[in-house]
Image: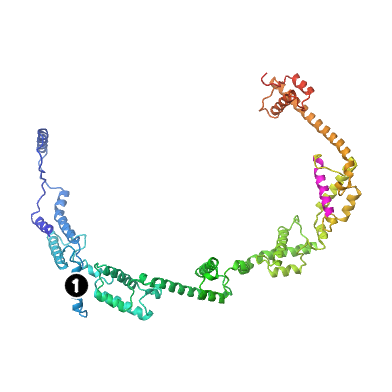
């Protein structure tokens, strides 16, 4: 209000602000002298300027014009920012008992006696309205009708903060509305507990009313200021309202009841699912039955963790009644359903290979397909896979990836499920052998004949030479097949081949026949011959490297290549190492003749010489 009065005075007088010197100590003589000099210079400059009418600048005019308006805005802001007064209890309605309201008012006054005295709401409201009226008068005096303050006028703001108060904050009408809603809820559900109704059916006003009532009840018990009076508490208790559900145990009971209610709802959905699909194997994948699938998964998880004793007997009886499978993987029901769902997809690929099998049978007259059969890619692997899965199916494995329809179709074309156990295995194996394998056997047989003519026996050892390594391994396999043949097992070694090998003189069991002893001397002679041959080969290689050393000397003027020299460098190091071993009494391939040849070309055995 004082600021508004100042604004009115400013409108009438429009004083110009003058800057006053702040009281303080006197300036120094030096500073006074400088100020006098500046003033004299300014007067001289003014005298030199042409005389013209002095007019205030546009900025100065706007500043003078806006000074009263700024003061009015400050007055309005001071009025709006005035702290709000404490709420008063609303007066009683015509229907409310006057004596009860007076008793509540006395109790409220007694609780507030210890607080600091503050002005009443009516006095505060009157003061605010007077200040606002003075500010509006000052605004009318400022000027023009087009000017309006940017802030809201106090006249258009809400008349009282009590109009925006939440539910049951001292309003009789709001209390009656909320208590009526609670009574209606109790008539529907026979309780004041909001958990009995679906969550989405509870209006926010009723939920907030219940929460706020419990909160205000706690304040009332502690002797603090509360919007709940004794009469209202009695009214809520008459309805059976529970102010402390945690202490009374209703919270746990409500939780169990809600959990059972949700369980029953999910069980009904499971019954509908079984009626439609014929099983209780609900998948968690997809978007159709995700909630039901998670619930079913939770029942199985509880069963695996706590067993049948850890599940409610009533719920367990319901699940057993509809044939609920607690472990579908172990029982195989999950695999059966999975295979049934996969059949349309895998059957298309199976039919493609089955068609190729019929084409092969029509072209060759049989269904004997080898791993190296050309022109039929994937057919051999498909046949092998069907035989493998058929064995699992015979063993009762529910995971066997084969179907009854497939088995029936393969039986129609006389498919051999177990060729290894049949009597015609030898015939089948022989027919499966291609011309390449047959020619390979006869090739090795010819090599054995050549070896027999050269050495006079068929004892081929693997450690003799590289030329006979393959032949020795082939003979070893023929002896192994002969032992299996004598035991009545099926092998690639036929009677005809056994006769050919026996006629050439192959010893089927050399360790027991004793003929191997007679070949010892021949083996020694053969070993000596082999050693001589190997030494001759090494001498030829040495002579070739010596010729390279002579060429190196003609080119470089010496016969001592460095170690980094390709081939010659490592060979020269080896010759020096052999020379040192000879000097220490060891035997090496470096003979005296070779040493003399190396020294003749100037080769140094000691690098430090």
533 displayed left or right of 142: right
Q: Check the picture and name the quadrant holding the N terminus.
A: bottom left
Question: Residue 317, position in %: x, y?
Answer: 54, 76
Q: Is residue 42 left or right of residue 570?
A: left
Say which of 92 and 536 sits in front: 92
- Residue 398 placement, left or right of 125: right
- The part of the image, by quadrant, that contains residue 350 is bottom right
Q: Is residue 273 above or below residue 474?
A: below
Q: Quadrant of residue 363?
A: bottom right
For the residue pair 36 and 448, the one nearer the viewer reads as 448
Q: Please count the marks in the image.
A: 1
Residue sitting at x 82%, y 48%? 476
Region of the chain picked out in magenta, as a range: 466-483
Q: Residue furthest right?
A: 503
Image coordinates for residue 579, horizontal then vertical, percent = 73, 24
Q: Is residue 288 visible?
A: no
Q: Is 468 included in the stretch rendered in magenta?
A: yes
At label 1, counting other C-alpha atoms closer than 10 Å, the crowd grade (few under 14, some 14-19, many 20 or more) is some
Residue at left offset 84%, top offset 56% = 485
125 versus 100 height, above or below: above
Q: Can residue 561 be seen in the rendering of this structure? A: yes
Is-magenta flag for residue 222? no
Q: Position of residue 102 (x, y in %)?
A: 18, 75
**What kind of element bears circle 1?**
helix
Task: Residue under label 1, please give it.
Answer: 105
Outermost residue toward the left in this view: 13
Instruction: Point out residue 284 in the picture as x, y percentages from the top left corner.
Output: 53, 66
Q: How is the image coloured?
A: rainbow
Q: Magenta part mainly helix, strand or loop?
A: helix
Q: Quadrant location of the C terminus? A: top right
Q: Quadrant of residue 560?
A: top right
């Amino acid at each position: 209000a004082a600021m508004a009065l100042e604004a009115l005075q400013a409108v009438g007088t429009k004083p110009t602000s003058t800057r006053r010197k702040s009281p303080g100590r006197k300036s120094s003589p030096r500073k006074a002298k400088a100020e006098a000099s500046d003033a004299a210079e300014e007067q001289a400059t003014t005298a030199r300027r042409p005389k013209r009418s002095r007019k205030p600048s546009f900025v100065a005019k706007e500043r003078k014009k806006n000074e009263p308006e700024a003061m009015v805005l400050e007055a309005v802001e001071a009025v709006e920012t005035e702290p709000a007064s404490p709420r008063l209890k609303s007066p009683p309605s015509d229907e409310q008992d006057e004596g009860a309201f007076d008793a509540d008012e006395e109790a409220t006054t007694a609780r507030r006696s210890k607080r600091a005295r503050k002005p009443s709401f009516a006095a505060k409201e009157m003061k605010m309205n007077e200040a606002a009226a003075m500010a509006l008068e000052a605004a009318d005096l400022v000027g023009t009708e087009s000017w309006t303050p940017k802030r809201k006028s106090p006249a258009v703001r809400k008349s009282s903060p009590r109009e925006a108060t939440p539910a049951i904050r001292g309003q009789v009408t709001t209390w009656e509305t909320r208590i009526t809603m609670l009574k209606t809820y109790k008539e529907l559900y026979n309780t004041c507990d909001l958990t009995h109704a679906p969550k989405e059916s509870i209006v926010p006003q009723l939920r907030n009313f219940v929460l706020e009532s419990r909160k205000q009840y706690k304040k009332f018990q502690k002797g603090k200021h509360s919007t709940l009076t004794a009469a209202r508490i009695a009214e809520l208790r008459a309805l059976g309202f529970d102010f402390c559900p945690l202490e009374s145990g209703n919270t746990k009971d409500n939780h169990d009841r809600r959990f059972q209610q949700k369980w029953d709802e999910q069980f009904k959905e499971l019954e509908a699912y079984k009626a439609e699909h014929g099983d209780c194997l609900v998948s968690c994948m997809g978007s159709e039955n995700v909630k039901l699938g998670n619930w079913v998964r939770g029942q199985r998880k509880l069963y695996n963790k706590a067993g049948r004793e850890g599940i409610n007997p009533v719920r367990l009886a319901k699940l057993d009644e509809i044939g609920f499978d607690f472990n579908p993987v172990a029982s195989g029901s999950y695999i059966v359903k999975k295979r049934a769902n996969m059949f349309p997809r895998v059957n298309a690929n199976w039919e493609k290979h089955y068609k190729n099998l019929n084409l092969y049978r029509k072209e060759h007259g049989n269904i004997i397909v080898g791993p190296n059969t050309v022109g039929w890619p994937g057919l051999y692997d498909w046949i092998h896979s069907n035989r493998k899965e058929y064995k699992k199916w015979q063993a009762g494995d529910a995971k066997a990836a084969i179907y009854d329809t497939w088995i029936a179709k393969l039986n129609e074309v006389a498919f051999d499920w177990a060729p290894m156990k049949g009597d015609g295995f030898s015939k089948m194996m022989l027919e499966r052998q291609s011309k390449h394998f047959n020619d390979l056997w006869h090739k090795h047989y010819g090599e054995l004949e050549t070896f027999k003519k050269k050495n006079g026996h068929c004892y081929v050892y693997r450690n003799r030479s590289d030329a006979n390594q393959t032949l020795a391994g082939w003979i070893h396999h023929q002896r192994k097949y002969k032992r299996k043949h004598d035991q009545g097992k099926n092998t690639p070694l036929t009677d005809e081949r056994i006769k050919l090998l026996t006629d050439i003189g192959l010893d089927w069991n050399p360790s027991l026949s004793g003929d191997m002893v007679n070949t010892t001397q021949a083996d020694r002679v053969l070993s000596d011959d082999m050693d001589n041959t190997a030494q001759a080969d090494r001498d030829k290689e040495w002579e070739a490297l010596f010729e390279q050393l002579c060429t190196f000397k003609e080119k470089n003027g010496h016969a001592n290549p460095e170690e980094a020299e390709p081939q010659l460098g490592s060979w020269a190091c080896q010759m020096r190492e052999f020379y040192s071993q000879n000097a220490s009494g060891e035997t090496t391939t470096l003979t005296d003749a070779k040493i003399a040849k190396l020294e003749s070309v100037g080769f140094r055995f000691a690098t430090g010489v």
